[in-house]
Amino acid sequence: MADKIDRNLSHSTVHVTLSTAAKPMRYLYYPGCSLEGTAVEYDLATRALMQALDIDVIDVAGWTCCGATAASGVSRLLALSLAARNLALAEAMHSDCDLLVPCSACYLNLQRAAHAMREEPQTRAAVNRILADEHLSVTGTVRVRHILDVLARDVGADTIASHVRRPLNGQTIAPYYGCQCLRPYAVFDDPQAPASMSPLIRAVGAEVLPWTMGPRCCGGAHMTTHMHAGMDLTGAILAAAKDADAIATVCPMCQINLDGFQKKIARHRGAVLETTVVYLPQLLGLAMGLGPHAVGLQRNLSVTASFKNALRSLEASV
Amino acid sequence: MLHSATERKGEGVSLEAHTASVRQMMRACIQCGTCSASCPNAGAMDMTPRRIWRCVQMDSFEEIFTSQTFTLCSSCYYCSLRCPRGLQPADAMAALKCIAAARQMPQHRSSTLFYRYFLRSVRRNGRVHEMEVMTGYFAHMKNPLLPLRYASLGWKLTSKGKISLPRPARGKGKLDALFAKVAQVEEEN
């Protein structure tokens, strides 16, 4: 495993050196379906943050669903084809930019498809037959990058710190990574003890909650099909974050599990679990002086009164 | 559209042929139990992942598919990361889900129906329409109490402008051609 991480990290380091030596930072952008619906604030905040950092994002024209978790539970070829269609669209844009993906489930599906296209010639041939009807073809050469990877390694904590206008002093943030940006592909962080979010949180003046729940599973889609199992997993994360002022997330599925069912889980566990849950780009954006509306904070399902008050008093102190 | 070729491909294929690929994936399992110890859902499973892999090796189909274990895999990939044999147990769990979906096993209706409505929405719109998935799923589950579990979340999401009512289905689905071609290629193989 260590080998796998090292190989991936050294591979990426070469790439980062090349891209930062070049012109302004620019990425192709795959928002994914959730970011048009239940995670619309993740999209708003990501775009606003990138703009504030002077980073261009170019939407992949005509993108469609990556297959989510559903397709891989029905047919591997269907799952790979749905994801690869988007890789093909990105490749057709003839850009040397990496593909920026905020949703961890989309990230994993696109990453998996890119690996399969590069490493399994037979699968690539089958997928290309399927895509040929639309005059698309895929090689798997576009580099798929999770937003946390881009923020942690391409942008970096120093750049974020230099943009901070409203430091989140006195706030303690629980960094929650979830599964699919870390595993099975260990690209940018330790998949069992991740730490890439910590420097970013400290860069905006907040403290990092010491906890071990960062890489634990929230239950994913269990909240729909196995609700009790889902509530146990999400509940354990919420309970462990009780000393934090907010949980920072990087995945729409984690976010809705953590912020959409708090009352239900509290009843299930017989405990009070009211916690603010925000997407990492929202948190960074707020500290960089973007207004709550600009990062879509009014769309979050769980922002406590004390978090709102803290934001207001930080605003007043600037 | 619900009973497309992709979903029907299990008919006529023996369960043994269907599970052969999963057996191949887990052939080198040494039964160490790292997967079970790493699984966040093991406590909710009626059979541990380690035991499922033994059943896969022994072709004990009835045990595998009577169990709910593989439907409780939430794709966290701890087992794949830690397997000392370098196997991909999470992918094998997904392969078992595919078999249950393809054969439309009644005991796994809840999970497979959800996937099916999800993909139906993708096929029709190109992108997932979350409200369409949930209304289709609820209607097909025929459990009048089920939607109530999500009523409060549904209300919150609607009031935040995050979901809207589904549009009526008209004309060709955006990804009809892709889904049909996948089914055709799978049929040939």
Image (cartoon, coloured by chain):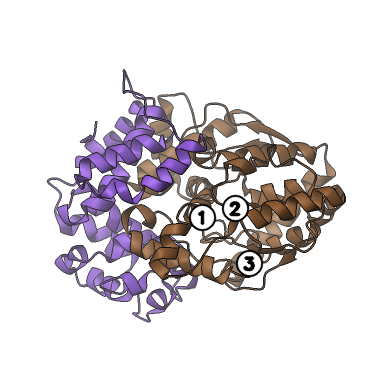
Chain colours: A brown, B purple
Circle 1 sits on which residue? A254
> Of A143 and A50, which appears nearest the observer?
A50
Specify the amino acid type for callout 1. Cys
Identify the residue at image location x=44%, y=70%. B79
Residues marked 1 and 2 touching at CB (< 8 Å): yes
Q: Please report the residue visible at 78 percent of the width from the left and 54 percent of the height from the top.
A: A156
> Alpha-carbon neighbours of circle 1 within 10 Å: few (<14), some, or many (≥20)?
many
Residue A199 at x, y = what percent?
76, 62
Of callouts 3 and 2, the N-terminal one: 3
Q: Are marks 3 and 2 in contact (CB under 8 Å)?
A: no
Q: Please determine if labels 1 and 3 lie on a single subunit.
A: yes
Which residue matches tag 3? A194
User: Which residue bears the numbered disc 2?
Assistant: A250
Relative to A222, is B156 on the left or the right? right
Task: Locate the N terminus of chain A and report the quarter of the image it occupies.
Answer: bottom right
Alpha carbons under labels 3 and 2: distance apart: 13 Å
What secondary structure is found at the residue carrying circle 1?
helix
Coordinates of residue B90 in the picture (x, y in percent): 39, 62
| Relative vertical location of residue B11 with respect to residue A304 in this rendering, above or below | above
For the residue carrying disc 2, how many other residues have a C-alpha within 10 Å: few (<14), some (14-19), or many (20+)? many
